[in-house]
Image (cartoon, rainbow, N blue to C red):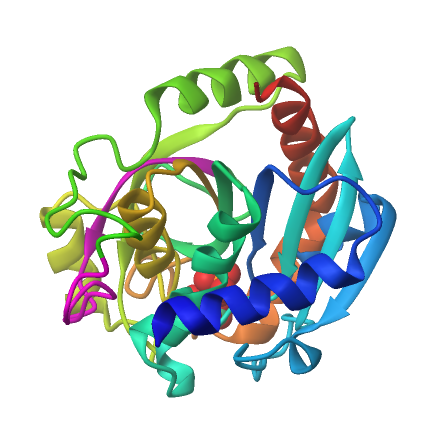
Amino acid sequence: MMMEQINESKTYIEEQLSTTKPDIGLILGSGLGILADEIENPKVIPYADIPHFPTSTVSGHKGQLVIGTLQGQHVIAMQGRFHYYEGYSMQQVTFPVRVMKALGVEQLLVTNAAGGINESFNPGDLMLISDHINMMGDNPLIGPNVDELGPRFPDMSQAYSNELMKVAKSCAQEINLNLQEGVYVGNTGPTYETGSEIKLLRTLGGDAVGMSTVPEVIVANHAGMKVLGISCISNMAAGILDQPLSHDEVIETTEKVREDFIKLVKNVIKKMA
Ligand code: R1P
């Protein structure tokens, strides 16, 4: 069933494309969809038109695929992603990653807006994700394993590719960007964390926290894709500053770092093999 759905989505997308197939995938987080506007000769496909695709319900997530070229590379970008808290299953949340792989994508760049847990971070910083902690209490691979898609017990020891991290670090240096590095904690949301939860997550080794990314990265690893992750620290998490958190603030900060974010990602894409 799952294979059939993947193939139907893939076929639909292929039918819309006159250009070469994409080989780099991009998932653009809250407020970061703007990057897709940089894609040349774009073919835009609304999620609503693609068979079996969920639709975006969160503000700051446009809900469309943008396929074209960026820095001479063939890319497919999700301008908006799906979250578990929207009521979608883990399999629905990660379905687009399966479709990207079926289309030939071997490298995935995931981005998100995240709250800073590490007190040396500042809102507006960009953080290279070196690893993640799954606190979502669920996993997209639960259920019968589809062997054509990947192994029953996938290795996650290099969930975020060391090779791609090196590329990102050297790109950041080139553009004089102070790129932070750390561990992303994935929670379900939709509530932001309490101050006590943030203290706990800090003790566990988390540097940033959000409500996405982890399921997508699990599926990408299952599928044998290489992953690079970048978080935009949109605010400091609860208990650090004495101010309430809001999604409006998250979007506002991502708008402020837009330029750095676009510069870094474009540079990285250019250097991806
Ligand atoms: C909360 O403000 C929203 O921003 C982040 C959180 O996960 C949550 O959806 O969005 P992305 O992770 O999609 O960037």
Most frequent secondary structure within the magenta stretch: loop
Residue at the outermost right position? 41
Q: Residue at x 76, y 39 (%)?
A: 20
Residue numbers of the magenta segment = 127-146
Whether residue 140 appears in magenta in the rendering, the answer is yes
- Give the camera-side residue of 213 and 196: 213
238 over 176 or under it: above or below: below
Instruction: Determine the residue positioned at 75% across, 62% down.
Output: 15
| Quarter occupied by the N terminus | bottom left
- Residue 54 picture location, percent across and down: 52, 80
Residue 70 location (% of width, % of height): 76, 35
Q: Nearer the viewer, residue 98 or 198?
A: 98
Q: Residue at x 68, y 41 (%)?
A: 75
Residue 232 visible in image: no
Q: Is residue 21 above or below residue 192?
A: above
Residue 11, position in %: x, y? 63, 63
User: Is 134 left, or right, of 214 in this rendering?
Assistant: left
Above or below for 212 versus 100: below
Q: Is 93 one of the magenta-colored residues?
A: no
Specify whether residue 218 is in view.
yes
